[in-house]
Amino acid sequence: MKKVGIIMGSDSDLPVVGKAADVLKEFGVPYEMHIYSAHRTPVEARDFCVNARANGFGVIIAAAGMAAHLAGAMAAGTTLPVIGIPIKSAQLGGMDALLSTVQMPSGIPVATVAIDGAKNAGMLAVEMLSIADDALAEKLDAYRIKMTEEVLNKDRKLNN
Ligand code: RP5
């Protein structure tokens, strides 16, 4: 199976970004995590995305806060799908990173999830890999069924 690359701009992003890794673990999807910044380590960030496909990656998740160029920089260096996670900042609450991540010029897409939306980034990566992996697609079906049952159980309890 292809790996997922999880790249974050700073170790301060890890408490949020770890939730994407938790999803990948739950679905048995291999991944690598790195701290590469578009601003502080541009050479390493570029090297990662340029070689990602040859190194066995199928999807890249890129998380950054503030002037968040990381996901866009990743997307510029690969034709693999890139999922962007805008990270909440103390100053602007994540709107800064959301706009920096989502407003990509046409031709270089970043599939942007919600501010701090690391769990959905992990889910989306699994869904992307499931296109070529029937066993993974079955796991996703089972996950949906379980989620539905959990909600309906809560609904039943509400009126009892
Ligand atoms: C971004 O700047 C990082 O992704 C992080 O969200 C933010 C702040 O980084 P630190 O100053 O905490 O390292 O590049």
Image: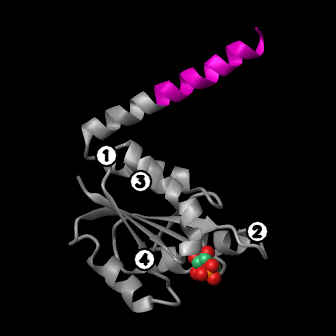
Q: Are marks 4 and 1 in contact (CB under 8 Å)?
A: no
Which residue in the protein does label 1 denote?
Answer: 131
Q: Earlier in the sequence, mark 1 or mark 2?
A: 2
Mark 1 neighbour class, 10 Å CA radius: few under 14, some 14 to 19, many 20 or more:
few
Which residue in the protein does label 2 denote?
Answer: 93
Q: Rounded to the nearest whole Å, what is the CA distance between mark 3 and mark 1?
A: 10 Å
Q: Residue furthest top?
A: 160
Q: Is the residue 144 above or below the residue 160 in the image?
A: below
Q: Which mark is residue 125?
A: 3
Q: Are marks 4 and 2 in contact (CB under 8 Å)?
A: no
Q: Is the residue 151 above or below the residue 34 in the image?
A: above
Mark 3 neighbour class, 10 Å CA radius: few under 14, some 14 to 19, many 20 or more:
many
Q: Is the residue 150 above or below the residue 11 in the image?
A: above
- Residue at the image position 71 percent from the left and 72 percent from the top: 89
Residue 146 lies in the magenta stretch: yes
Count how many numbered circles sit on residues in the image. 4
The magenta stretch is 144-160
- Residue at the image position 55 percent from the left and 80 percent from the top: 69
The residue tagged with tag 3: helix, strand or loop?
A: helix
Ligand 1 near label 1 (Cβ, under 8 Å)? no
Q: Are marks 4 and 3 in contact (CB under 8 Å)?
A: no
